[in-house]
Amino acid sequence: MMNKLIELRNISRAFGRTQQATRVLESIDLTIDDGDKLAIVGPSGSGKSTLLSIIGLLDPHYQGDYFLRGRNIKALENKQLSQLRNNQIGWIFQNFNLISHLSALDNVAIPMRYNQNIKSKEYNERALHALDVVGLADKYALKPSELSGGQQQRVAIARALINEPSLILADEPTGNLDSHTSSKIIELLLNLPTSGATLVIVTHDANIAQQCSRRVKIHDGSLVHDHQ
Ligand SMILES: Nc1ncnc2c1ncn2[C@@H]1O[C@H](COP(=O)(O)OP(=O)(O)OP(=O)(O)O)[C@@H](O)[C@H]1O
Ligand SMILES: [Mg+2]
C-alpha cells in the first residue's frame, strides 16, 4: 500500500483585501502518495504556481488544512518548517534560478549548508556525485553563463536532489527549453535514482502531463481529477 505524503483538505487561497479579494483556489482536496509523479495543468493564471507554493510550504496564507505525513502544517514551528523546506523539498523553476557568480558545483552545494545532517567536508564530494547523476560531472567548475539552458536545468535538478528530499516540485521546468532538451529533462526527472521521490510538475505541455502517473487540472479555482 502507498503511504500518504500530502493531504490537502478544503484548501482555498485568495489575494487582496477581503472585500475585493481575488479567489484563486476554491476548496481544493488533493492527496499525494509517496512516489507519485503528479502533473498539475490548467490555463495561465489559473493558480498552478499558487498551489505549488502552498504545497512547497512557501505560502502559509491559505484557508483549509494541509497535512504532511499526517501532521497539520499549522501546528509546526517556524524552525521545523524551514528545516522541512530545505531538507525535504527540492524546487526546480522555469528559469533555473542558479546563482550566476557560483560554479555548478557550488550552486549544487547550497542547500547542504542549511542541512545539519551533512558535514561541510562532504559538500564537494556529494555535489560532484549529484552532478554526475545528471550527467554533468565534467562541467562542475563552469558558471551558469557558460552552460546551455538544458545544462543549467540539470544543475538545478542536482541542487534539488542534493539533500535527498522526499518531494520534488517543478514549476514549468521545461518552459525555457527546446522540445528535444525538454524531453531529456523530463526523462531525467521521471527516472531519478532516488526512485521513491515524489514529483509534482506544473506544466502546459500535454505530452509531459501524459508521461506522469497522475494528472489534475485547475479549472475556475477547482481541481478536476483525472481518472486513474
Ligand atoms: N502575490 C499575489 N498577489 C496578488 N495576486 C496574485 C499573487 N500571486 C498570484 N496572484 C494571482 O493569482 C492568479 C493565479 O496565479 P498563478 O501564478 O498561480 O497562475 P499560474 O496558473 O501559475 O499561471 P502561469 O501558467 O501563467 O504561470 C493570477 O490571477 C495572479 O494574478
Ligand atoms: Mg505559474
Image: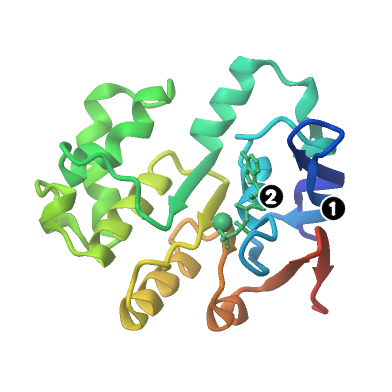
**Residue 84 percent location from the top left of the image:** 58, 30
143 or 88, nearer to the observer:
143
Q: Residue at x 42, y 67 (%)?
A: 175
- 90 sits left or right of 154 in the view: right
Residues under numbered marks 1 and 2 in contact, where contact means CB atoms less than 8 Å apart: yes
User: What is the number of the mark on residue 28?
Assistant: 1
What amino acid is labelled 1 in the image? Ile
Q: Residue at x 78, y 42 (%)?
A: 13
Q: Determine the secondary structure under disc 1.
A: strand
Disc 1 to disc 2, how far (Cα)? 9 Å
**Residue 182 percent location from the top left of the image:** 38, 75
- 166 sits left or right of 65 in the view: left
Q: Give the quadrant of residue 89.
A: top right
Q: Is residue 157 visible?
A: yes
Query: Compared with residue 109, is residue 141 higher up or lower down, i.e. above or below?
Result: below
**Residue 51 percent location from the top left of the image:** 69, 50
Near mark 2 (Cα within 10 A), the count class, few <14, some 14-19 or many ≥20, is many
What amino acid is labelled 2 in the image? Leu
212 or 222, nearer to the observer:
222
Q: Give the quadrant of residue 121.
A: top left
- Residue identifier under label 2: 51
**Residue 21 percent location from the top left of the image:** 80, 40
Badge 1 or badge 2: first in the primary sequence: 1
